[in-house]
Each structure stands twice: as C-alpha cells, then as structure tokens.
Image: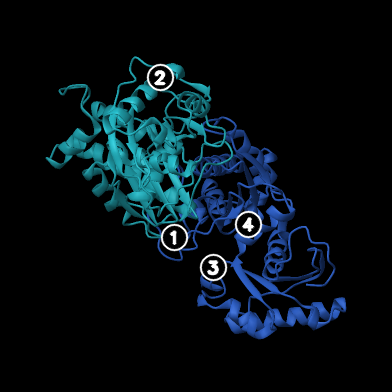
Chain colours: A cyan, B blue
Amino acid sequence: MRIALADRQGKILARRAASTRSTSSPNMVVRQICQGVSHLLKETGVTRSSLLAIAAGAPGVTDRDAGVVFATSYLNGWRNVPLRSLLQSALHVPAAVENDVKLAAIGEHWMGAARGLRDFVFLAIGTGIAAGIFVNGELLHGPNWVAGEVGYLIVPGTPETPVKLGAPGSLESAIGGEGIRQNWLRSRNGHGLADDITATEIFRRALNADANAQVVLEKSARILAYAVYNISTVLNSSLFVLGGGVGVSEPLLKATRRTLREYTQPARPRLTVSELGQDAQLVGAVRLALDQVEIPIASNKSKTL
Amino acid sequence: MRIALADRQGKILARRAASTRSTSSPNMVVRQICQGVSHLLKETGVTRSSLLAIAAGAPGVTDRDAGVVFATSYLNGWRNVPLRSLLQSALHVPAAVENDVKLAAIGEHWMGAARGLRDFVFLAIGTGIAAGIFVNGELLHGPNWVAGEVGYLIVPGTPETPVKLGAPGSLESAIGGEGIRQNWLRSRNGHGLADDITATEIFRRALNADANAQVVLEKSARILAYAVYNISTVLNSSLFVLGGGVGVSEPLLKATRRTLREYTQPARPRLTVSELGQDAQLVGAVRLALDQVEIPIASNKSKTL
C-alpha cells in the first residue's frame, strides 16, 4: 500500500509505503490507512483539521458512485466492501474510491503522458492487465463498472476458452507477467534458469541475443499489438500509455511499435509509456480527492490536502 | 438512396428510394436529394417554407462537426466532400451529415431496440461491418471520426495481416456478406450452387441440415461472438443491437448467443436485433435533423420537418 499527502496544487508533500501482506479485512486496511495518514501529518507538521479529503484506489471492480469495491482477487478477495464510507467514518473527511488502474489513468491525464488529451487509453500490464479509458474527456466506467477490463480480450495467440470468475482473462494469461514467464519456461522446456525470473528480465535478455527470450518477446509484442489495435479500432483513441511493471519495458514497447506500424487502417494509434510510473495512481488519487472538495484543476490556492 | 419526410415528432410522412448506381459525383447526389425532397413535399402537400432541416447519412468516415465526408469506398470513392454545405446551399435549410451506421445507432437509441440506454453498441453487418457506439448517453466519434470501425477487428479466425486503405478489414473479410459467401464456396470446393447466394440464405440452409452451411454458420457465429465479447470487454456495453442485411439473420443471432453464453466474465452483454431494420438510418437522420433546429426529444409540436 502506498499513501501520500499532497497540497491543493497536487504537490506531494510526503509519502509512505506499507505492506498489506498480513492485512486483509477491510477494517484492517482502513486502520492501516489511518495510521499512514497520522504519520504523514506528523511528518509534514500539517494539522489534522487541514485534512480536506481522501481518495483510495482498489485493485478490483469498484463502483465509484456508491463508493463500493465490488470484487478484488487481492487482499483475500474482497466482495462489496463499502470502502468510501469506512474511510469517511474513520477520517471524518470526504472520501472517494476508484479502481486503481482508472486512478492511474486520471493521474496520467492530469500530470502525465496524456495531459490535455480527450481520448486516450492507459494500459496497465503487470501481474494483471486492465485499462483506464478516457473518451470525450471523461473516464469510462460502463454500467457494471467493468469498462476497460481488457485483460479478458481474445486475440490471435491468446487462449479462446471462457474463463471463470477470479481466473485471469485470456489476454492476461498470455501477456500478463505470469503468462510471459510461463511462455519463457515452456520455450526452454523447463531447463536452466531460476523460476523467479520476471517478464522484464526476459525482455532484457532478448536484447542480449537470447533466442528463446526473443521468441517470447516477439510473441508478446504481437499479442499486445493486436490488443492495442482492437481497442483503437473500437474507440479511435489517439494515444495508448503503457504502465505497470511489464508495460513500461522498453524492449516490449519497441517491439510492439514495430508490429503496430504495419497496421495503418482505420487510424494508427500512438504508443508511449507512462510518465508518472509508479506514481500514476497516487497522482490520480490526489486529483480524485481534490475533486471531492471541488478544487479546480488550475487552482492556485495553498491550503493543504 | 432512401429519403423520407418527417414531422416534428419524427413521424415519417412519406418516403422514396432511388438508385445511386449511375450517380457518383457529390453534385449529382445532391441534385438527386433535392429532386427527392421536391417529390416528397408535393406528395404530402407540405409547403417548401415548412421545411426546417435536413440530415444525410454517408457510407464512410464522416466529420459531423465540419459536415464533411472524408472517405467512402462507395459512390466511386468520395474524398473530403463538404456534403453539409452542399445541402445547405441547395436547400436553404440547416443540414447535418453523419456516418450511416452512426445514424442507425441514433435511430435505435431514439425509437428502437436501445431506447433509454446510455451504453450500447449498434453493430451493422452487411457488405461492410461497423458499429455506432453510445457511451454515457453520447455517440462516440473519436478524434479521427473512426470510432466504431470494428470491421478492422482482429480475432481468432480472421486474417491477421494488415489491410490497405480501401480494402475490407479483418473482421469484415471474415464475416461481412462477401466473406461468408467466400467461406461457403470454399467449403464446397466451388461445387454446386449459384455464386450469387447470400449470407442470409446460407444461414437459412444451415437450419435445414445442410452440413456445409452449418460449418459456415458456426464459424461465423464464433468470430462474431469474439468481436462482440472484445468490444464489450473494452466498453462494458449492456446491449448489442445487430443490424444490416447479415446482422439481422435469426440463425446467426441464435448461434452467436449460444457461443457468447459461455463467456460470463467480466460481464455478459445482451445481444438482440435491430427493431427498426432498414428504417434505423432514416429515423436517426430525422433525429439528427430535429437536433439542428433544437427540437427536443419529447416535443409535441406539429410543424412539419
């Protein structure tokens, strides 16, 4: 869990990270957040009465209007957790909750690679795969709050069989971190290297003339290119911003661009990587918190958030 | 070309159809439209001064804001035709132009299968394939006006190679009318039936225990199911409305629903067929024309459009 304190311009004043490995119940997580807030206030010398709002990201399907985390496969699998009201009760300030990838998209839109764009896709590829989609300047949620769950896309090279609740989607099982690692292990018939090699390390080896790694990289890039192309064909997004541990891999970006370059019709999407990196979600959370107290984007007031 | 005269409630008073086979230049098409308007006014006894607005659909990429048809592969291939200003100059009333499939989506949203829905996809499958997409109650266009050009989707079973400008996209070449016909001919090694059999007729034969036709139907339905599933995964649309000559085929609808039923994550889209059929575009054009003179949806005035 990462937590930050920012002022009304969105400038991050202090931050903390804490493990949720031994945390799982919503009440425990909220307690951990409150401890983090107290710590950050003390560290910065900001009084508690100056705290204006809080926003939290959750790694799962989240109803932003109701403030409820419907489902996540992390944290021992939350179901229908009213995180917003839990946070409001605990901290006595307006709170907001949002899906973590959508938060990152808000961050990139506000201060990152997608500044000023009305139509773009933030595509997070890590253990999981999901997108935060802006159309007409607005974040897309969909009637069931699952817009952008593109880890389920089916393209040539991904499994075609239906997936069960909680299982990784087709695209995710092909080019999520674990899928790439499995591909690599299969390509070597289980020989040789340590099991805990990461996708990013595999892609790095591809640059060093490792033939197995090159095959995995090319295959991953082609599947990612099809996913980007398909999403672009639906939305006509002008930019795709890649994020997440796997998504920011430079060799993956270059190989995917190479494949995408051939696909010019009906429009050619631009592909780039996150400018905010791991901070994208934090910056998005700050923006969402500011929205709760209606502080406009161009605000230059100086009270602390 | 189909043309209709409607009143301010959207009730169609009269209609005409004319062939554009010997028509191709924009000026010829506009002249043909003007002749049609004169005919309809005379037929209904409506005075020319009662004509309030006109809206036209074009089978290609259309910039609704500028009123320009960028490109169409029909009508001998228009490029950058300022159809709106041509119509305004010729008819002296406010005019609007829109892509024909998007017009049909507007029609289904106003008076058809998607009444009252904020998020749905109208998916037209005929010679070509394209979608009109509503998100958050608004029609999606995209920065290059090509949102919804889903004939280019790449899914398992479609070609994967890049397509050139003017050539049919991957999905279109697999399950557009001509693609289905080619599949059928291939499945019979060119034997037997007349070359001019339609996709709808092939699907009808599948119901009559024609094994070749059944294979073509099942393959088409699976590809269509993947396309619907992928679009749904991006947008979380609650409803897909199938239209177009091939799209309204009942055997195709049933077979596609059967495949889609297995794909329950992250959300299960509903699939239905157009309620307005061939009139969807006309009804959408009436709505768009009414919008030009700002007549609200629930209007009950009685002046003629």
- As measured in the structure, the alpha-carbon distance from the residue carrying label 1 to the one carrying label 3 is 13 Å
> Left of B31 or right of it: where is A6?
left
Which element carries disc 1, helix, strand or loop? loop
Query: Which amino acid lies under the numbered mark 2 shown in the image of this protein?
Result: Arg
Q: Position of residue B253 (x, y in %)?
A: 65, 42
* Helix, strand or loop at mark 2: helix
The subunit carrying tag 4 is B
Mark earlier in primary sequence (3, 4): 3
Which label sits on residue A266? Answer: 1
Please identify the quadrant where the N terminus of chain A is shown: top left
- Residue assigned mark 2: A31
| Residue B62 coordinates in the image, percent (x, y) | 54, 68
Task: Determine the residue located farthest toward the left in the rendered image.
Answer: A208
Crowd rating for badge 4 (residues with CA inside 10 Å; few <14, some 14–19, many 20+): few
Identity, as a three-letter code, of the amino acid under mark 1: Pro
- For label 4, the SS is loop
